[in-house]
Image (cartoon, rainbow, N blue to C red):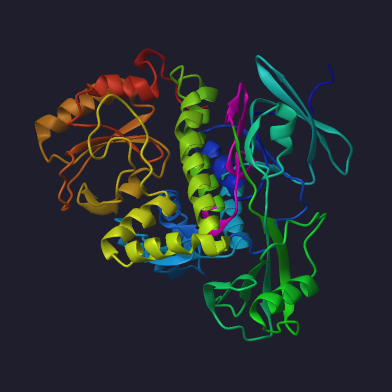
Amino acid sequence: MTPPDATAQVVVVGAGPVGLLLAGDLRLHGVRVVLADTLAEPMTESRASQLNARTMELLAQRGLVEAFDDLAHEAAGHFGGLAFDARTTASRYAGNWKVPQFRTEAVLGERARAAGVDLRREHRLRTLHVTDDGVEARFDTPAGPRTLRADYLVGCDGAGSTVRDLAGFELSGSAAVRELLRADITGIEVPDRRFERFERGFAASSRRADGVTRVMVHTSGRPPAPRTGPPSFAEVAQAWRTVTGEDIAGATAIWLDAFDDARAQATAYRRGRVLLAGDAAHVHMPVGGQALNLGLQDAANLGWKLAAQVHGWAPPDLLDSYHEERHPVGRRVLDNVQAQGMLLFGGAGTAPVRDVLAELLARPQLHELFAGMVSGLDVRYAVGPDNGPLLGARMPDLDVTVDGTPTTVSRLLGDGHAVLLDLTGDRTSAGDLLQAARPWTGRVRVVGGTCDADLTDGAAFLLRPDGHVVWTDRARLPLRQALRRWFGDAETVAQPA
């Protein structure tokens, strides 16, 4: 066998937002990472332009929110075009945050580079060879074929994932029946349309703070066209005129795109030493930015688990819990996107459903339900036999005081460790927790502090590195058992390399 050109503990294929976040997280945990991408340079297109509240929490945990100097807050969310107040969730980042995707990639890319990720561009994956002890990936590059060998490989390479195809993952779903065209344009005033249904189709438009207007249009009864590239602006302008009666042909298009309502999900997110994240694992219409945000939240779930596996201290089923936790979340998003598509593009037969839902959304007390669903804030994992209010959910980003210094829960999680957070204010309790967690010192930090919030769900919490609660002092499960379940046998805990 030809010796590999490079070796790593993990190869990540795809340097979009999901691959960049995952690679940066793996480096945070001391994993040697090669990140390979087909593009010669970072993309400059706006594409997905919205970060939701849960994603913002994850960025805050990594100290990245301040790196965005162009975030625009938007209070309103929508479900199938029907508005609700997205600020109703219990998060300091409640609502939506507008930022073009190239800016998100730039922030995540800078973090990855600073952490030491080995980024290799113009690497097009051609073959995969998977064995019991590793993965060998062959790439075409301008300098000729190159081979990378790693313990694990993760496909973050989008809806048309080469990794998914080469590794033999199966997809379950349904083919597209309709297509939407969109463009970012300048040089013309277009009336803002949140989501408007017309006799001949659907149209939406919104103007960004930088003066760029995004238009999106669907012509009723028009099936997806076979494409090898984006549509022409003339095609977008003609569809806009057909649906709205307006002429936007005089605008300048700076980005063009076509997408459809295909729905697909990998039946498994892991096959041995190969895993999928982001659009490689789930494909759906990008309504409300859910595709990008779902993928980033996949990466946050996977990174620390894969690092534990690489370093040899992971419990036997920890890496499998990535699929067990994220596959149902992905399926739920596919379902809500499909429902939204029916509301947005369905004919007269869907009008009664829209009317009923509009009546429900006129009640502010239901807004939190919808905001939690489309933001990922309501995600809750099955983490054990208990079923307390916070177990399995993400820990709210509370303001806490540690050693006299104000901080937040997200900052406590910033170094990638799990946190055993003691807010009891009781010295005896703090000592007991510290003693119980001492054998896991390499993986779990014990932090004592105070908090002014009303802690009805407990006063001591074990938080995984992704911020989800896996034990509280009100749980029936003993603390040591929870520590062992998530962070391995104490006797075999190893420090990151």
Decide: is 184 above or below 118.
below
Q: Residue at point 32% right, 67% down?
A: 362
Residue 435: image location, x then y, percent: 21, 23
Q: Is residue 288 visible?
A: no
Q: Which of these two is toward me, 110 or 108?
A: 108
In the rendered image, residue 167 lying in the magenta stretch gets the answer no
Q: Which of these two is toward me, 393 or 105?
A: 393
Q: How many marks?
A: 0
- Please state if 162 lies on the left or on the right of 425 as rendered: right
Work out which quarter of the rendered image holds the N terminus and state it: top right
Q: Is residue 487 visible?
A: yes
Q: Which of these two is toward me, 98 or 39?
A: 98
In the rendered image, residue 271 lying in the magenta stretch gets the answer yes
Decide: is 76 above or below 130.
below
Residue 378: image location, x then y, percent: 36, 47
Decide: is 6 above or below 66.
above
Residue 276: image location, x then y, percent: 61, 35
Residue 402: image location, x then y, percent: 23, 47
Q: Which residues are magenta?
A: 267-290
- Please state if 267 lies on the left or on the right of 91 as rendered: right
Q: Residue at point 34% right, 30% down?
A: 444
